[in-house]
């Protein structure tokens, strides 16, 4: 082993995962483990852990690492992910120290509560939909930005799924619009390609975006497959950076900031609020179980549930009175 045994082990471990993880997941794994390796190297240099070698790091060293991350203000969810990455790496080298840490120091294991985060504020959704409906189709900068944000709000597609959409998989007919997402989260393992309905608020905007897209590509003499094509490249798809830039364009235009990650939750919650079948919503969002949808994304609002129960009992009472 050289001066940086953690890096040496990574260079052996990561190629073994190639082909078993998507390119995106492999890149994330590499980035996170390199960051963790630097922390262990620092802790070893400070004399706080016994080793920074994944073959030899002990459960006590893991405990010190977790404590260091907590003191640094890192969220419990992030530390849990750190432990997951470390466990896979260590087990590859026959080191079960992560599990031993959990058994020996159960009270030190980061705990999290699953709190369903809120959807986008109704006022901001309305502003985006209204503004997107009147933008000049020849204003490509704004049409592109509003097109992507509106599709995100009206389909609940993840960032990866949005980036990799094909224009040939968009269908608009008398019943509205739907999009076939071929490239999905968990592609090649648990993820399944699926059709996604477009919320009625987004159908006209999607149609207008397709017109703007055709005008722009014709002016550039290009023929691209991506629904959101990178105009300055030949072929391929948008980068995540471009998506963030589009969001900024919309924020600047409406004078309000919003979290693009809320678009997915907004789609689910709006559908449930409107009375859509919960099972249908879960399938459209690409979840493997109703519990995932309910726990993390959307559910019937508590106030609505209470009023429906009151109405149910009221109707029952009226029925008895009429007998």
Image: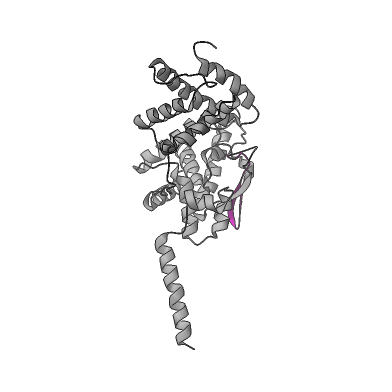
The correct choice, above or below, for 34 with respect to 143 in the image is: above
Q: Nearer the viewer, residue 232 or 313?
A: 313
Q: Residue at x 61, y 41 (%)?
A: 167
| Image coordinates for residue 311, horizontal then vertical, percent | 43, 73
Left or right, 207 with reference to 129: right
Q: Which residues are magenta?
A: 170-186
Q: Quadrant of residue 281?
A: bottom right
Instruction: State the quadrant of the N terminus.
Output: top right
| Image coordinates for residue 133, horizontal then vertical, percent | 45, 49
The image's colour scheme reads one colour
The correct choice, above or below, for 4 with respect to 165 in the image is: above
Q: Residue at x 48, y 51 (%)?
A: 295
- Seen from this angle, which residue lies furthest top? 2
| Image coordinates for residue 103, horizontal then vertical, percent | 49, 36
Task: Look at the image and tell me whether residue 297 can be seen.
Answer: no
Q: Nearer the viewer, residue 29 or 171?
A: 29
Q: Quadrant of residue 314?
A: bottom left
Q: Nearer the viewer, residue 182 or 58?
A: 58
Left or right, 255 with reference to 3: left
Asked whether 172 falls inside the magenta stretch, the response is yes
Q: Nearer the viewer, residue 210 or 167?
A: 167
| Image coordinates for residue 150, horizontal then vertical, percent | 48, 46
Asked whether 105 falls inside the magenta stretch, the response is no
- Seen from this angle, which residue lies furthest bottom? 323
Q: Quadrant of residue 318?
A: bottom left
Task: Look at the image and tell me whether residue 56 can be seen.
Answer: yes
Q: How many marks?
A: 0
Q: Residue at x 62, y 22 (%)?
A: 15
């Amino acid at each position: 082993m050289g001066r940086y045994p953690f890096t040496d082990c990574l260079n052996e471990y990561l190629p073994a995962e190639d082909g078993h993880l998507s390119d995106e997941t492999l890149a994330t794994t590499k980035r996170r483990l390199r960051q963790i390796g630097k922390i262990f190297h620092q802790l070893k240099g400070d004399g706080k852990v016994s080793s920074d070698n994944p073959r030899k790091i002990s459960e006590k060293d893991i405990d010190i690492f977790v404590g260091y991350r907590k003191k640094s203000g890192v969220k419990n969810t992030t530390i849990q992910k750190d432990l997951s990455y470390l466990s896979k790496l260590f087990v590859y080298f026959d080191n079960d120290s992560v599990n031993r840490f959990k058994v020996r120091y159960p009270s030190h294991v980061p705990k999290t509560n699953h709190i369903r985060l809120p959807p986008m504020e109704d006022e901001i959704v309305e502003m985006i939909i209204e503004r997107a409906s009147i933008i000049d189709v020849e204003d490509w900068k704004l049409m592109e930005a509003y097109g992507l944000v509106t599709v995100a709000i009206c389909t609940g597609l993840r960032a990866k799924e949005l980036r990799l959409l094909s224009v040939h998989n968009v269908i608009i007919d008398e019943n509205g619009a739907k999009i076939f997402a071929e490239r999905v989260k968990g592609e090649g393992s648990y993820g399944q390609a699926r059709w996604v309905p477009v919320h009625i608020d987004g159908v006209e905007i999607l149609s207008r975006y397709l017109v703007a897209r055709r005008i722009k590509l014709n002016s550039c003499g290009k023929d691209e497959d991506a629904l959101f094509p990178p105009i300055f490249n030949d072929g391929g798809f948008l980068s995540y950076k471009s998506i963030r830039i589009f969001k900024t364009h919309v924020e600047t235009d409406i004078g309000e900031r919003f979290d693009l990650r809320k678009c997915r939750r907004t789609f689910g919650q709006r559908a449930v609020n409107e009375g859509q079948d919960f099972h249908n919503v879960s399938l459209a969002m690409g979840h493997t179980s109703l519990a995932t949808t309910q726990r993390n994304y959307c559910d019937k609002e508590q106030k609505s549930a209470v009023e429906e129960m009151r109405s149910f009992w009221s109707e029952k009472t009226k029925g008895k009175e009429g007998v």
